[in-house]
Image (tube, grey):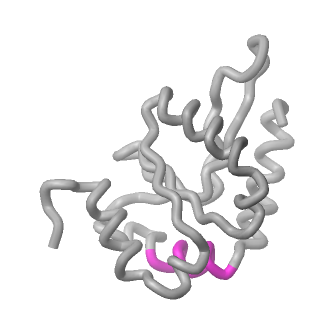
Amino acid sequence: MANYNKVLQYAREMRKNPTKAEKIFWRNVRNRRFEGEKFYRQYIIKHGGYMTKESYFIADFYCHKSKLIIELDGPIHEQQQEYDEVREEILNQLGYKILRFKNEEILQNWQEVKTKIKEVLDPHNIN
């Protein structure tokens, strides 16, 4: 999806139809509820792409202050591991940090997820 308007439309559709895990995650981080940090959902990130065409990734959740991307992985990610690895490598090269959680972790163990995110946001101040 090289066309920004198509990517934006897709991101909007994903915001309208979140998974159960995305709903729970968003409920816990929206409006600076998580450590006072601002999170965005279905955030579009531009990268170089192929042969100077602009390309975009859509991060499930993003905290600009710490350049932290949080990805919630459902069953589809088991079939696209190679794509996820390449995408992650590109994003790391651009200076982004990425945390991945399986949907089940969000649904069943929010406290552990919360701790892992806090460690990345402020590794020197874990409660």
Query: Is 24 contained in the magenta span?
Result: yes
Q: Please provide percent x and percent y for residue 82.
A: 70, 43
The chief SS type of the magenta part is helix
Q: Please provide percent x and percent y for residue 68.
A: 43, 49
Q: Please provide percent x and percent y for residue 33.
A: 37, 73
Query: Is 74 contained in the magenta span?
Result: no
Residue at 38% across, 67% down: 32
Residue 82 in the image: above or below residue 28 = above
* Quadrant containing the N terminus in the rendered view: top right
The furthest residue to the bottom: 108
Q: Which residues are magenta?
A: 20-28
* Quadrant containing the C terminus in the rendered view: bottom left
The furthest residue to the top: 51
Q: Quadrant of residue 14?
A: bottom right
Residue at 36% across, 63% down: 117
Q: Please give left or right for residue 58 compared with residue 31 in the image.
A: right
Q: How many marks?
A: 0
Residue at 57% across, 40% down: 88
Residue at 43% across, 32% down: 95
Residue 90 in the image: above or below residue 42 = above
Q: Please provide percent x and percent y for residue 123.
A: 20, 55
Residue 41 in the image: above or below residue 66 = below
Q: Please give left or right for residue 60 compared with residue 117 in the image.
A: right
Q: Please give left or right for residue 67 compared with residue 106 in the image.
A: left
- Report the front residue among 62 and 111: 111
Q: Please give left or right for residue 61 compared with residue 57 in the image.
A: left
